[in-house]
Amino acid sequence: MVMKVAVDRDICCGAGQCGAIAPGVFDEDDNDGLVILLTDSPAPEHHAHVREAADACPAAAIVITE
């Protein structure tokens, strides 16, 4: 299954939960604390963590397409 991930930095609040849950897919910008998407096509072994990160995002800034 192919997963595509996108983030909306305009609504990101910088909570950092995504990077804590899926560090291979998300990181935090050192300048403004907002999300950085490291890959828009995570490997299948990361899918569960990406879904968890999207669910945990308080701003709903992570969009997943499968």
Image (tube, rainbow, N blue to C red):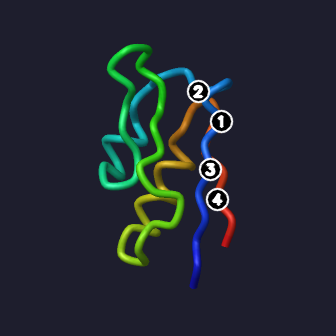
- Residue 61 to residue 11: above or below: below
* Residue drawn at point x = 41 percent, y = 60 percent: 49
Quadrant containing the N terminus in the rendered view: bottom right
Taking the view exactly as shown, the residue that stands out farthest to the bottom is 1
Cβ–Cβ under 8 Å for marks 3 and 4: no
**What kind of residue is marked 3?**
Ala
Cβ–Cβ under 8 Å for marks 1 and 3: yes
| CA gap, disc 1 and disc 2 | 6 Å
For mark 1, what is the residue? 8
Q: Position of residue 19 (x, y in %)?
A: 36, 41
For mark 2, what is the residue? 12
For mark 4, what is the residue? 64
Classed neighbour count for the residue bearing mark 4: other residues with Cα under 10 Å, few (<14), some (14–19), many (≥20):
some
For mark 2, give the secondary structure. Answer: loop
For mark 3, what is the residue? 6
Q: Earlier in the sequence, mark 3 or mark 2?
A: 3
**What kind of residue is marked 1?**
Asp
**What kind of residue is marked 4?**
Ile
Front one among 29 and 50: 29
Q: Earlier in the sequence, mark 4 or mark 2?
A: 2
| CA gap, disc 3 and disc 4 | 7 Å
Q: Position of residue 4 (x, y in %)?
A: 61, 65
For mark 4, give the secondary structure. Answer: strand
Quadrant containing the C terminus in the rendered view: bottom right
Q: Earlier in the sequence, mark 3 or mark 4?
A: 3
Tell whether 28 sits left or right of 3. left
For mark 3, give the secondary structure. Answer: strand
**What kind of residue is marked 2?**
Cys
Classed neighbour count for the residue bearing mark 3: other residues with Cα under 10 Å, few (<14), some (14–19), many (≥20):
some
Q: Position of residue 25 (x, y in %)?
A: 39, 53
